[in-house]
Amino acid sequence: MVKPLSPGLTRFGGAMLIAALASGIAGEFSGQPAFSTMAGVFALTGCLGFWPGISWTSRGFMLIAAGLVALSAIFQADWEPTLVNAVQKGGFIAAFFTAINAMRAAAGGSEPIVACGRFLAAQPPGRRYLALTVGGHLFGLILIYGGIALLGTLATEAAEKEPDPEIRRHRIRRMLVAIQRGFVSTLPWSPLSFASAITLSIVPGAEWAQVLPYSLVGVLLFSGIGWALDTIFKPRLSTPPRPRGQAEGQWLKRMSPLLVLLGLLAGLTAALHLATGVRIIGTVMALVPVIALVWAAFQAPGGRPDPGHALSRAKGFAFGDMPELRNQTVLLVMAAFIGTVGGHLAAPLMAASGLDLTVVPAPLLLVLLFWFVPLTGQLGMNPILAVSLIGPILPAPEALGVTPAAMVVAITSGWALSGATSPFTASTLLVASFGRVSARRVGLIWNGPYTLACGACLSAWIVLMAVAGL
């Protein structure tokens, strides 16, 4: 059993993650690799500080990382640049994870945001699935996995009021998968998602703005197929349900707090990106903590902005919220680190085996790449680890005769599919806990037909992109 982390190590680990965030932002805006390396050093130091208070799974990841570094040092002459690259990747993950959780922490204390979720959960059956899918998408943009937790809580609370156990069971399932599918549809395009951030960093020549139009096709497929399946295959009830009224209030009015927040984030991100030339991921990393801090100031008692309240919330986030997420932090950082070093170790083995991926037809290779992430997810491999491992051995897009956008869409779409099916991802685990079923049942039974339908349509879209040079 893991012992609770001491107050000193709690504060130390939290401080290291904040330092990693600050260094990561400095690296993005200065273009100096030294800052990115510093972010990685701070992140790894924080992970070591968390050692007494993390699970043996997390510790195992750290030991595997150390073992891979030793193997690289023994068998590879260029192990030092690989190590620096792995440190930088781990630092980026820690900084990005800290930034997006700052927004989640601020939103969690906002009653208007909670009211938006409550409004969506109260929609009548005819439009409940679509409302929760859209809601899962919008909340996922801001709260990441916290969006599933918030909407899942509100949805199950609303469903528990249903006296008929048969209707209640079906309603909980349909509401939860609507939220989950809405969330996973953010992964192919959202600049706040790890899928976009990591994939854009490993595919040469990939730019978020260039990939966006093609990623949005995947978003429409993920959302539309889920709604169509729910509409076509409605459960047959043994007794007809009681008639229900409409939810109170107007959509635009009730959803305005969330829409304003998203508009503010999008507008400021675009403006900073155009003014500085810093990539979208970097501007998001810098802006999100600032927005969260200002937002926290406006949540002070009395309705007036209070910098002191914001500072208190910031301290609570740094020395409370982030250390509470230490297991997730260590796993994410180590997944990026292991993937980078492991991929570099695998590259010469691939070359020695004579396997040349450039001879595989590009459409086939991209479809295989698309399915690689969800299939390895069934084996317990984190998508960050899977993508970081395969990234170094992939040919450049131009060597395959495809655009960077096609490769990015293949990877991020597979990542999204893994989020709906893998029993080891946070999204599936959260839905399983709310539905009181196993995570494997959620991934393979609840989302099985959805996975096959989305997989077939997205495979066709990826082939079209490869063939047409999109």
Image: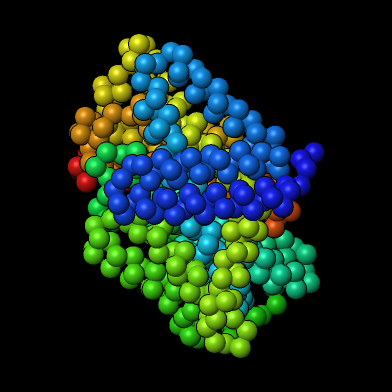
Residue 147 in view (yes/no): no
The residue at the point 59 percent across, 32 percent down is 62
Q: Where is residue 265 in the image (x, y as percent from the top left)?
A: 39, 69
Residue sitting at x 79%, y 72%: 163
Q: Which residue is drawn at 20% across and 34% down?
A: 398
Apparent side of residue 148 relative to residue 412 in the rendered image (left or right)? right
Outermost residue on the front side: it is: 8
Residue drawn where x is 67% and y is 65% of the image: 153
Q: In this view, does 134 lie to the left or right of 166?
A: left
Q: Looking at the image, can residue 345 be seen?
A: yes
Question: Residue 424: horizontal and vertical position, in percent?
Answer: 61, 41
| Marker count (numbered) | 0
Residue 458 in the image: x percent, y percent?
A: 38, 46
Which coloring applies here? rainbow
Residue 468: percent from left, percent from top: 20, 43
Which quadrant of the structure image shows residue 32? top left
182 is higher (above) or lower (below) than 416: below
* Residue 379 position (above or below residue 425): above
In this rendered view, identify the residue nearer to me: 88 or 196: 88
